[in-house]
Amino acid sequence: MEIFRFICKRTLWSLVALVGLSIIIFTLSRVVPGDPARMALGPRATEEAVEALRIELKLDQPIIYQYFHWIASVLKGDFGLSLMTMRSVTDDIKIYLPATLELVIVAAIIQCVFGILLGVLATASQGSYMDYFLRIIAYIGVVTPSFVFAVLFMLLFGYKLPILPVLGRTSVGLGVQPITGMIVVDSILRCDFPVAVDAFVHLLLPATALAMNGMAQLARITRSSMIDNSERDYIVMETAQGLSKKEIFFKYLLRPSVIPAVSVLALQIGALFANAFLVESIFNWPGLSRYGVEAMLFKDLNAVSAVICIVGFVFIIANIFVDILVAIIDPRVRLKAGE
Amino acid sequence: MSSEVLLEVKDLNVYYRVYEGLMHVLDDVSFSLVEGERLGLVGETGCGKTTTFRALLRVLDSNASSKGDILYKGCNVNKMSQTELLNTRRTEMSMIFQDPTSSLNPVFTVGEQISSVIRANLQAKGINYSENDIKDIALKALSDVLLPDPERIFDSYPFQLSGGMRQRICIAMSVATERKLLLADEPGTSLDVTIQAQILGLLNNLVKTTGMSVILATHSLGVVRETTDRVCIMYGGEIVEIGPTRSLFANPSHPYTRALLACVPKLTGEGIAEGIPGEMVSYLNPPKGCRFQPRCSFCNEDCNRTKPKLTLYEDDHYVACHKADL
């Protein structure tokens, strides 16, 4: 199976990337100026107490030793103690990661499906008012930051036309015993469908606000690559052979044209995590991005390294997933990588 | 050979709108073809052979416009409805594209692509079929063009095959189902000589057994001499000379045709041919008179002012030159 070989190869390379990422994260977190122990205990703490914490955090050991010590505990799932919350970082992440993951996954699906759909629609109506309208919308979508969309949506759907909830992950009083931490998934697993619907409705606005940039970008890429490909020899040949317009458009033109859009999706998943911070703040979404920024401001080394590590890990997983998707669509990637 | 007229092209003009202006590529191209006839279309690169073919099937690029009458079995292709056009492409005419590396869709298997073409043809004819029938027709077409191991090629992607194989797949696609008129745009250019001879032999056989007509665009005069009944010499988007192959080779009367024949390397090795001095005509701003006049050594004032019309030179042999009697 060529696709299986492709996945194995791709995963092995990702491991190399992960090791590199861990080195960079660790180094950066140690070279930033300031004393984490002092930050944690505050200016009034005694010198002895600070020194004790430094030893406990292994900050007095050589840097190489610190790295391997850190890696060993990370592999055991232990990111150490958060200096900000004074709880285990792993426990904090268990609470915050699923919320962000849920948001980012839904946003990625929205931008992929609707971005490509709008691109196809614009191509099909090329030159008409529909096309111009969609292109203007796409320009606006590309240049407007996602927090602006978040505020706009909040005004529109929470104030002027209150049809969708704008705050939190569920309505007050609703909830579900966590399994994965993602409320929609958990409530479906526990067959609690009213909660699933409620949680999903809560997801719609923040996820759409987050997806807008990428969606506009994907629509533009899809449209331009379809128009570009439509004058290729193979499309002319298929037209000359009498294939129907519908078959050419939806089969022979669409498939080679979505490849660039899907490849770009991998990069955009990174941007989704970055933009999630402001969107989470506006929609009062208890997510990892917000936690991460607060940890940075507090100089909470363990929490910062953990957040970057987790985001990097998710990003790499997402990239593998997108690469597999591209390989399924494009035989050239699938077959040449196997050689 | 029946003498029913299959295709009649009258005053075909094709323009391309480009950034610099309007290119007037085909200029009053007129010719006709009877059933079962093999017509050669000869001229240097850029003289409008491919444009002529694409105009016949109405598959010109979006920046091109075509004027004139293309009467196929009495119906004007330029005025056909979408359904008529689709049926004509599916059952009547088919074209072999010149560049095999870009004429196949890179993300679909050869089998999927050739099956689509066969399916469209069978649908247009109203024949009931199963997917197995289609595969059988496809495999037969692939082995007809001398491709080894058609089963494997059916399941391959174009990038896994060589240029020559892809060329033969393009040919197989065009001849997999029966057509009345085949437009072959340099079908042998990227094949080696032995395969080229076999492919041309194959096309010749098809003409004999099915009564199909062929227009063969090429710049190989040898091929034309061997495989066609009539020849059409094109220069700069115009037909400069047209006539029965034998008569035209025996008696080339347009200065361009003569120069072209002089360019063929001789087996006796009497030095290298001189080529034709000068440059191809600029379609943005073509000369008012004869388009070949800037490169012609016989030209005079007349050639500069007025465009020569195709006039009878000898039996069925026409030439567009003021100086044809020279």
Image (cartoon, coloured by chain):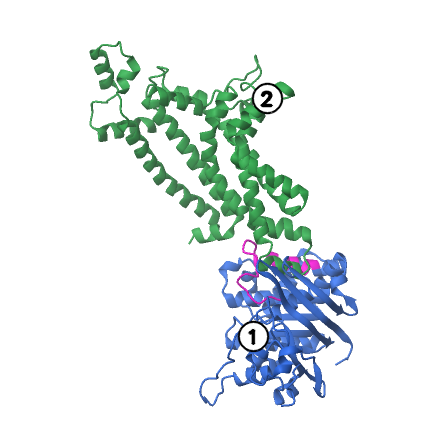
Q: Could you tell me residue B69's position as x and y percent? A: 75, 68
Amino acid type shown at disc 2:
Leu
Image check: A276 left or right of A299? right
Q: Chain of mark 1?
A: B
- Rendering quarter of residue B140: bottom right
Q: Is residue B75 above or below residue B32?
A: above
Q: Are marks 1 and 2 in contact (CB under 8 Å)?
A: no
Eyeballing the image, is A264 above or below A278?
below
Is residue A121 or residue A131 the one in the foreground?
A: A131
Residue A270 occupies which quadrant of the picture? top left
Please name the residue shown 50% across and 39% down the image: A265
Q: Which quarter of the rendered picture does the C terminus of chain A lie within?
A: bottom left
Please state which of residues B191 and B97 is positioned toward the viewer in this rendering: B97
Q: Confirm whether the magenta stretch covers residue B106.
A: yes
Alpha-carbon span between mark 1 and mark 2:
67 Å
Q: Which chain is blue?
A: B
Magenta-colored span: B96-120
Residue A8 or residue B263, whichever sits in front: B263
Quarter of the view holding residue B224: bottom right
Q: Is residue B269 visible?
A: yes
Q: Position of residue A208 (x, y in %)?
A: 56, 29
* Residue at the spot of label 1: B44
- Identify residue type, mark 1: Glu
Q: Mark 2 packing: few (<14 Cα in 10 Å), some, or many (20+)?
A: some
Colour given to chain A in the rendered image? green
- Whether residue B102 appears in magenta in the rendering, the answer is yes
Relative to B254, does residue A202 appear above or below in the rendering?
above
Residue tagged by mark 2? Answer: A155
